[in-house]
């Protein structure tokens, strides 16, 4: 079992971290939430019934944990200093990038993340799962426990909301050379 859990972590820890990072209002919470997700997966793996794939089951747990953390954060958390996430970016950075390319990519990603935080939670979750995590429509429907039509609708509306937020940010001068393109 320990070997299997290590394989599970190797396969899903990075994608789940990226997913949670984009769902939370405070990205510095992503490491803690990701850890909580995998603790739940480890504790509840015996209860996995196989009515969906392991991947969608883990994403379902991630959606619930991120949602719980957002609710907790909005109710109880006081103003705190944010932890810089440079270490995360160093892990994700392409070593062949020049410093300028790396900075530009990071700024673009930060601006898109900022715009995403202004999109309704249900829409944002669907867009992140599809466009940034690469899940299929069926996997998203299983993970969120909603119909395929609702998934498609949320993704469409989420993309439109994101595009609108990015356009507003561009009009305010916050963007320079940032583009968002979903498939």
Image (tube, grey):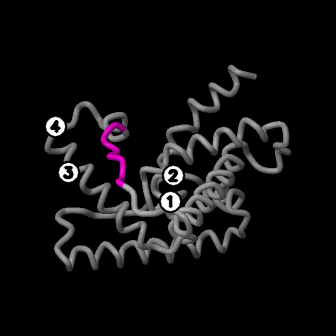
Distance, label 4 to label 3, CA atoms, is 10 Å
The answer to whether residue 39 is left or right of residue 134 is: right
Secondary structure type for disc 3: helix
Camera-side residue of 127 and 89:
89
- The residue segment tinted magenta is 81-87
Camera-side residue of 114 and 101:
114
Q: Which residue is mark 1?
A: 23
Distance, label 1 to label 2, CA atoms, is 6 Å
Q: Which residue is mark 3?
A: 104
Distance, label 3 to label 2, CA atoms, is 21 Å
What residue sits 51% from the left and 74% below the top?
A: 120
Mark 2 or mark 4: whose residue is earlier in sequence: 2
Q: Residue 121: x, y in percent? A: 54, 70
Look at the picture and state if 160 lies above or below 74. Answer: below
Secondary structure mainly formed by the magenta segment: loop
Mark 3 or mark 2: whose residue is earlier in sequence: 2
Mark 3 or mark 1: whose residue is earlier in sequence: 1
Badge 4: few (under 14), some or many (20 or more) residues near its Cα, within 10 Å?
A: few
Distance, label 3 to label 1, CA atoms, is 22 Å
Label annotation for residue 81 = none
Q: Quadrant of residue 125?
A: bottom right
Label annotation for residue 98 = 4
Disc 4 versus disc 1: nearer the observer = 1
Q: Which residue is mark 2?
A: 19
Q: Quadrant of residue 168?
A: bottom left
Mark 4 or mark 1: whose residue is earlier in sequence: 1
What residue sits 58% from the left and 71% below the top?
A: 122
Mark 4 or mark 3: whose residue is earlier in sequence: 4
Q: Residue 38: x, y in percent? A: 64, 39
What residue sits 50% from the left and 45% below the top?
A: 17
């Amino acid at each position: 079992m320990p070997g299997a859990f290590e394989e599970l972590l190797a396969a899903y820890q990075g994608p789940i971290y990226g997913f949670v990072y984009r769902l939370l209002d405070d990205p510095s919470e992503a490491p803690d939430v990701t850890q909580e997700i995998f603790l739940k997966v480890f504790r509840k793996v015996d209860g996995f019934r196989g009515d969906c794939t392991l991947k969608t089951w883990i994403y379902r747990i991630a959606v619930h944990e991120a949602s719980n953390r957002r609710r907790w954060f909005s109710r109880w958390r006081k103003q705190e200093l944010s932890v810089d996430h440079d270490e995360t970016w160093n892990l994700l950075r392409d070593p062949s990038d020049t410093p300028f390319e790396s900075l530009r990519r990071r700024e673009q990603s930060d601006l898109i993340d900022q715009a995403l935080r202004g999109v309704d939670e249900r829409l944002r979750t669907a867009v992140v799962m599809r466009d940034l995590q690469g899940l299929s429509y069926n996997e998203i429907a299983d993970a969120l426990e909603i119909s395929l039509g609702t998934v498609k609708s949320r993704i469409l509306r989420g993309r439109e909301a994101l595009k609108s937020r990015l356009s507003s940010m561009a009009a305010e001068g916050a963007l320079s050379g940032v583009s968002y393109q979903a498939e």
